[in-house]
Image (spheres, helix red, strand yellow):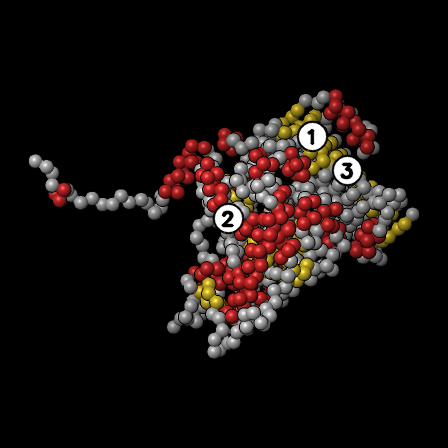
Amino acid sequence: MNRISLATSSLRDVNQAIRALPPTNGGELIIEEAKGNHALAVGAETDALIEVQGSVGYYCAGMNQSAHIRIKGSAGPGVAENMMSGIVEIEGDASQYAGATAHGGTLIIHGNASSRCGISMKGVNIVVRGNIGHMSAFMAQSGTMVVCGDAGDALGDSIYEARLYVRGSVASLGADCVEKEMKQSHLDEVRDLLALAGITDVEPTEFRRYGSARALYHFDIDQADAY
Amino acid sequence: MTSDPTNRPPTTTPRKSATFDDYTLSEIRRAAATGIYDIRGGGAKRRVPHFDDLLFLGASVSRYPLEGYRERCETGVTLGGRNASKPLELKIPITIAGMSFGSLSANAKEALGRGASVAGTSTTTGDGGMTPEERGQSKHLVYQYLPSRYGMNPDDLRKADAIEIVVGQGAKPGGGGMLLGQKISPRVAEMRNLPEGIDQRSACRHPDWTGPDDLEIKILELREITNWEKPIYVKVGASRPYFDVTLAIKAGADVVVLDGMQGGTAATQDVFIEHVGIPILSAIRPAVKALQDLDMHREVQLIVSGGIRNGADVAKALALGADAVSIGTAALVALGDNDPVWEAEYNALGTTAGAYDDWHEGLDPAGISTQDPELSKRLDPVAAGRRLANYLKVMTLEAQTIARACGKNHLHNLEPEDLCALTMEASAMAQVPLAGTSWIPGQTNPF
C-alpha cells in the first residue's frame, strides 16, 4: 500500500501523486498527516481508495471523479464540492457547504454537517449520520439528502427537484419547501443509501420527506412575500 | 359677429415634466398594469461619462508620431503569466466577454468562437457550461466559474485555456443570473440540471466561499485541479474598484476583469442595470492604482469592459492603464443583433431596431438571443463569425492608428499623458486634464 505524508511532501506533490494513479485498478493510497491542509485530494480521476489521516481544511476531495476518499478526521468548508462521482466519507464532522453543487457520487458524513450542507446540489447523494445546519439544501437542484439527525432553519430554501429525508426535527422549512408523502420508492431509496453508508440502527420509516412546492418556478407578484 | 383671434388670451405651450418624462410615465403604467419589475437585456442605457469625453493629444513639435503604414505598432498581449505555466498569448488586446449558451443560441456561440479565433483572441463561456461547438471553434476559450456552477465539471475545466471566477458583472454588481422559462429548452435544461421551462434565477454569491480569504483558497483548489497551467481571472463589476482589485490580486488572481455599468447582461431588472454600479471610465484609474500600489501593474493584467465600441475606446482604455478590453454587446451587434433588416419584426414585438432588449423572451428576430430552432437558423455561424473577425480587425487598426499618432510602437505604450478630457466629470474620473488646461479636478489647483 502506497503512503505519502504531508509532513514531508508538499500539497502539490501529494495531489500530483493522486493524479498519477490510473483511472481503473487505482489501488490504495494513504495520505498521512493531513494537518488541515486546504485543497487536498482535489480533482482525483481514479477509482483508488484514498485514506486521508487527520482533519482537512477547505475543499478536500473537490471535483472528485470515481475515487473513494475516506477522511479519518473532520473536514473544513466545501468538502467534496462539485463532486462528479465516487464516494467521499468523513469520519468526523463537516464544516459549511459540504457537497456544494456536487453533480454525482455519494457523500457520507458520519458526524454532523454545518450550515449550507448540499447547497445547490446537482445530483449527489448525501448521507449525514448526525445533524445539519441552517440553510442546508439551499437551491438544491437534484439528488438526495438523508439526514439521520435534525435539520436547522430554512431547510431546502428555493429548492428545485432534490429529495430531502430527515429523521429528526426540522427547525423550519425555507421558501417553497414543503413536507411530502413517503411512498414505497422513497423508503427504498432511503434504505439503499443508509446501507451504502453502513448505517444499520435506523429504519427508513422513521424519516419524513421534503421537497419543492414548485410555487416559485414561475414569477408571480402575489408570491413576492416568499422571497 | 365673429371672434377676433387676436383677442384670445395667450396660452403657454403644454409642458411635460423633466422628472416625469414620457418614458417614466410609461414605466409607471406598465408596472401598475403587470405587477412585475421590468426585465431586459443589455447594459445601462442612460448617458454616463464615457470614453467619448476623452480626446487624444496626438504628436506635434513636442512629440513625434510613427508612420501610419510603415512603422510597426504591436498589439499582442500575454495574459496570466503571474502564476500559470500556460499563459494566453493573444494577437490583439480585445477579447470576447462571457455570454452563456442558453442566453445565446448555439449558432451565436459558435460564431463568437469563429470570429475570435480568426482575429487571434479569446472568447468566454457563460452561466450555462461549455458546449462542444464553442470549444471546437475557439482557439482560446476562457471558462467561467460562476456561482450557479451549471454544467461545471473538471473535464471542461481542464479543456479550457483560462478560468474566469465571476464575482460580479457591471450590469448588476451584487446580482445573480436570470434566465426565464421561455429559454430553458431541453438542451439548456439538461446542461443546467433544471426542469424544462421554469424561470431560472442563479445565485448571486458563490455557494462555497464568501470573502477574499476564502477566494484565495478557491483559487488554490482550481490551480491544483488544473495542474497550475491555466491563468485564473477574477471578474468583478465596477463598484469599489480600488478595493476589489486589491483583494483579487492578494487572493492570487493572474488577471482581473473589471466590467462597468454599461456592460450587458442577458436579463436583469432594469432598475438594477441603470442604478447599481459605476461607469467604466470612472473605474479604470482606481483599478490601475491598486495594481501599482501592489507593484503588480502589467504583472497581473487588467481587462476592462462595458461600452467598448471602437478602436478609440480600446486605445483610451489602454492609455488609462488597462492591458486589454472585452466586448459583449458590440460583438453581438457585429453578429447581427438589432439589425434594421428585421425592422418589421422588431415593430411586431413593440420595439425598433437599435432598441430591442427583451433578450430574455427568446424571440430575437436576428436569431442570436434565442433557443427557438427556426429563429436560430437565421444566423449563419460562419458568415457571422466573419463579420465579428472583420469588426475586431477594424477596431485594432483604429487603435493602432491612434497609437502611432501618439508616437507609440505598442498599444500598451499609450499612457494617461496622451489624453485630455472634454468635461470636468470625465477629467475627474479619468484623472487627465481638462482640454486646454493643466487642471484635474480634485488633484491640481487651477489658479
For label 2, the residue is B43
For label 1, the residue is A163
Residue, x 64% and y 61% (percent of image)?
B91
Residue, x 76% and y 54% (percent of image)?
B227
Residue, x 56% and y 69% (percent of image)?
B69
Q: Amino acid at mark 3?
A: Gly
For label 3, the residue is A105
Q: Amino acid at mark 1?
A: Arg
B166 versus A166 height, above or below: below
Residue B297 seen in the figure: no
Q: Mark 1 falls within which chain?
A: A
Q: CA distance from mark 3 to mark 2?
A: 40 Å
Secondary structure beneath dot 1 equals: strand
Q: CA distance from mark 1 to mark 2?
A: 38 Å
Judge depth for marks 3 and 2 and give the one in front.
2
Q: Mark 3 falls within which chain?
A: A
Residue, x 80% and y 28% (percent of image)?
A192
